[in-house]
Amino acid sequence: MIISPATCAERHAALVVDDLTVSLGGRELVRGVRFEMAATERVALIGASGSGKSLTAAAVLGTLPIGAEVRGSVRVAGTDVSRLPPARRSTAARVAAVGQDPAAALNPLVPVGAQLALPLRNHRGLRGAELARQRAQLLSAVGLDDTERVLRSSPGELSGGQRQRVCIAMALASRAGLLVADEPTTALDLVTQAQVVAVLREASRDAALLFITHDLAVAASLCDRAVVLHAGAVVEDAPITRLLTAPQHEQSAALVAAARAGALPTRAGAAS
């Protein structure tokens, strides 16, 4: 049984995932997932390893593995993006991603300034002095105040936390209405993790945030609502404060208990 509050009206939704099913190699790894997000809402997609949360995020972003079969629909700001390639999704539906590994997201051979200029030029048509001003403003907005040094630096000259902030700045540069952050704090130390969460909180003031995580403590510090996945299906959709204090599904209760114990269960043989 799925335990869910009333959903927001679809016409006002930043994201509507409707009956999403993802199969790989003949196996259904995501099964009939449904949830909605309002504009500027912060929603955590929570589950143990193998629950299907990252595959659900990949379906939203259009980055599923080759050979994946998809049924159902994904609508971003009213636009059905289910069959659009990733490049078209970023422009047609204004969706941006922040991943777990900023080193993989950034070109190691290109200075940060040139990489940050791309979304400003391609999505907002900025050039010259206005591009330079917005670029510096974005870096300041994510807590990188030494803007000239950062702009000149290659990604390898920055720390992991600084690289993640650059990735958030690049996501903000497109003025996307939906930010999808897939385990963006997992590889960071606790201090840097808290700083990145604060940046994401500020970044999502004008956008909806889908935050994929296994960390309930981080989710509680950032999100309004939690959608719990287990074995590829939604088992609970609730305000995150209620989930933490009175989970209604046994898997939700297991995740809360595991988080308090400092470890989360893994479902063997499944994709995350």
Image: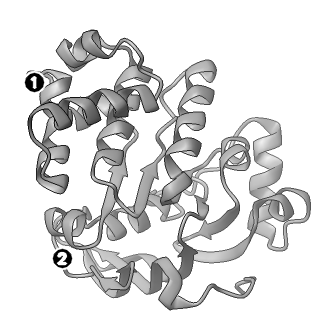
Look at label 2 and name its amino acid: Leu
Q: Secondary structure at mark 2?
A: loop
The residue sitting at 36% across, 69% down in the picture is 60
Q: Residues within 10 Å of mark 2 (few under 14, many from 20)?
A: some
Residue that badge 2 annotates: 84
Quarter of the picture containing the N terminus is: bottom right
Q: CA distance from mark 2 to mark 1?
A: 28 Å
Horizontal relation, residue 111 to residue 24: left or right? left
Horizontal relation, residue 85 to residue 8: left or right? left
Task: Give above or below for 136 relative to 130.
Answer: above
Instruction: Name which quarter of the figure residue 76 lies in.
Output: bottom left
The residue sitting at 69% across, 64% down in the picture is 225
Q: Secondary structure at mark 1?
A: loop
Task: Give above or below for 197 relative to 52.
Answer: above
Look at label 1 and name its amino acid: Val
Tell me where residue 80 appears, x and y as whole percent: 30, 85
